[in-house]
Amino acid sequence: MDKSFEKRKKIVYDLICDDLYVPMKFKELAMLLQVPKEQKTELREVLESLEADGRICLSKRGKYCKGGAKHLSGTFRAGFRGFGFVVTGDGSPDVYISEEDVNGAFDGDQVEFVIKKENQGGRRSREGRIVRVTARGMTKVVGLFQKKDQQNYGFVLPDNQRFPYDVFVPAERSKGAVSGHKVVAELTSYGEAGRKPEGRITEIIGHINDPGTDILSIVKGYELPVEFSGKILNQADRVAREVSPADMAGRKDLRDWQMVTIDGEDAKDLDDAVSLTMDGENYLLGVHIADVTNYVQENSAIDREARNRGTSVYLADRVIPMLPHRLSNGICSLNAGEDRLALSCLMTVDPRGMVIAHEIAETVIHVKERMTYTAVSKILEDKDPAERSRYQELVPMFERMERLSQILRGRRQRRGSIDFDFPETKMILDEEGKPLELRPYDRNTATKIIEDFMLLANETVAEEYYWQELPFVYRTHEPPAEDKIRALATFINNFGYSMHIGVNEIRPKEIQKLLARVENTPEESLICRLALRSMKQARYMPENLGHFGLAANYYTHFTSPIRRYPDLQIHRIIKDNLRGRMNEEKIAHYQSILPEVTKHSSEMERRAQEAERETVRLKKAEYMEQYIGEEFEGVISGMNKWGMYVELPDTVEGMVHVANMADDHYDYREDRYEMTGAHTGKVYKLGQKVRVRVLEVSRMLRTVDFEIADTITE
């Protein structure tokens, strides 16, 4: 830091804050300070710095006054290239912070900031400067330790690319770590100008080449709780292993119903079962959800831990459960051939897909068969004789389910529900976690059946409790910001498409109609991705704001209490209501806890999603190491000024950096999502098919670098 510059700032600041000072323009202030002509530029820099600090302000008449911009507070979220955003949490747009205005803040820090500029629309409608850090959000760093040869110190190279510095570690604080160890370092200093942050090693995770160390590093980096305490495990062990007659008392007995679970082959926590019969032309659909609350009492050690975790986390090679396996895979899991307690949503659905009657009840059930998506798909899509023979008693029910699923899906589409069908990644790993195969996850008839039935149950339960006007947890998805939708509408005009945008309103059906119009066109991938990016993120709330993406007025998460805490909380509310316990005291209790429960659950959901995506990127990079130098066909899936992203059919995405586009100098046209060659005029567009060569892979950065091998014409 330039001490002489800071000294001059203090002199000018003290003058402007003096009681005898009268606001004046730059020229008058320069005369008062007797600043020579050659130093006026420096005075202007001093004033701009004080203004940026929020310590003085410039009036509309161009006069410098004491008292600066209002100090605001929020959470800083760093980008990957130095800049970032401050999230205020009050619903207002995020505030863009340029690299020079970060002022020593790191990702996750609580900060005070001032607004520098209010822009009209656009992604950076507000720009600000961080004045000071009020609380550090990051206290530990996970990364690769490198010891300097012949030196008594080392550095931790952070895994988190949002932490921009290596961390200096003195020898006496290294805990014996050697080069190549993945470690956890506690930060003892956050550094300053000219000095790196410092830390001490608190844990050695393992060597970078040891199986499992890579995923465990991500687990540690996101501070995901893995082990359960002895107290919690002991509490889980005391839970009964079978359903007792006392447990069944007062419940609707559905054990003689034809009922199945349908899940993936490797699923162990089965929290939903389905049944379907006919009553004339109407469908009698039962969605039966594990009654976890019977075994997890409110404010018990297990409940507090589940609330803290918020959700189970599904990583590439492991599951970190919300509840101990003793519960999630045992008495709470709807295992075939065993009596189980459930909370059932029993719906009468007419041939149009309308729920004309329903009942939510505490039940006891007995699942007849544990089905897989693959087996049901073989029965319905492939008409596989062996599968149809093996499950011949169930085949008529599966065929009814397929018909009802199509009816429900058609009804949702007619009202405007948006279906972004981007493929998820199915990974096949060996025993040591090495990826053997990557492929898009198969979304077949069976997965759609379960999806449609769960959506209907969630909507039905949400609507019932909305009209009862009781405290509840809703899954909300707010309409997209108007500026993002108008930017999308402007962009699609380039391709001859249009959208109807009402006054301060966009209807989901407009997005759905757009996606239908672009289906099977060259620009389909491009427009679908841009439409998805214009959407807000769904979250949990105690208020019902509807679900934009599903075009649903009422929506909740009721169907997965084994792996999502909001569902568990909803079950508790429903049971209190069914049992006549929802008195004024209970209502006040839920009203007091639900704002924090929903906020924390939304935050834990985002943490889990980020960790899951990180492990997928890691395994994709590891998988592509064997293909360096080889060529693949792909689709341009994203662009920015640094280059283009290309996605391969197996869902691997890599970057073609502009530095590796050697045939020309390419400029990025943000308004058209195009890369244009300055000399050749060659144009690359989002959604375009290209042939790429694998240049480089970094497991540490979780990146794959491509270069263009050829363009593909159709």
Image: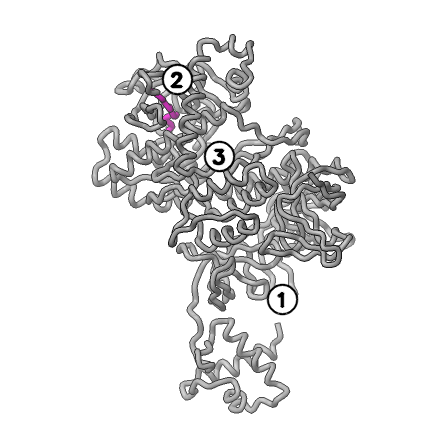
* 165 to the left or right of 711: left
Which residue lies under the disc numbered 3? 312
Residue 601 in sight from this viewpoint? no
Label 2, secondary structure: give it: loop
Is tag 3's residue or tag 2's residue first in the polypeptide sequence? Answer: 2
Q: In this view, does 122 lie above or below 229?
A: below
Which residue corresponds to the image point at 54% horizontal and 40% vertical from the top-left? 518
Quadrant occupied by the C terminus: top right
Residue 411 in sight from this viewpoint? yes
At label 2, the amino acid type is Glu
Which residue corresponds to the image point at 21% horizontal and 37% vertical from the top-left? 583
Which residue corresponds to the image point at 75% horizontal and 51% vertical from the top-left? 660
Main SS, magenta region, reads strand
Q: In this view, does 249 lie above or below 548?
A: above
Magenta highlight range = 284-292
Point out residue 68 in the picture as x, y percentages from the top left corner: 44, 74
Residue 288 occupies quadrant? top left
Which residue lies under the disc numbered 2? 242
Magenta stretch containing residue 696, yes or no?
no
Magenta stretch containing residue 291, yes or no?
yes
At label 3, the amino acid type is Ser
Which residue lies under the disc numbered 1? 193
Whole-angstrom CA distance, mark 3 to mark 2, is 24 Å
At label 1, the amino acid type is Ala
Whole-angstrom CA distance, mark 1 to mark 2, is 63 Å
Q: Residues within 10 Å of mark 1 (few under 14, many from 20)?
A: few
Point out residue 580 in the picture as x, y percentages from the top left corner: 22, 31
Q: Residue 81 carries which label?
A: none
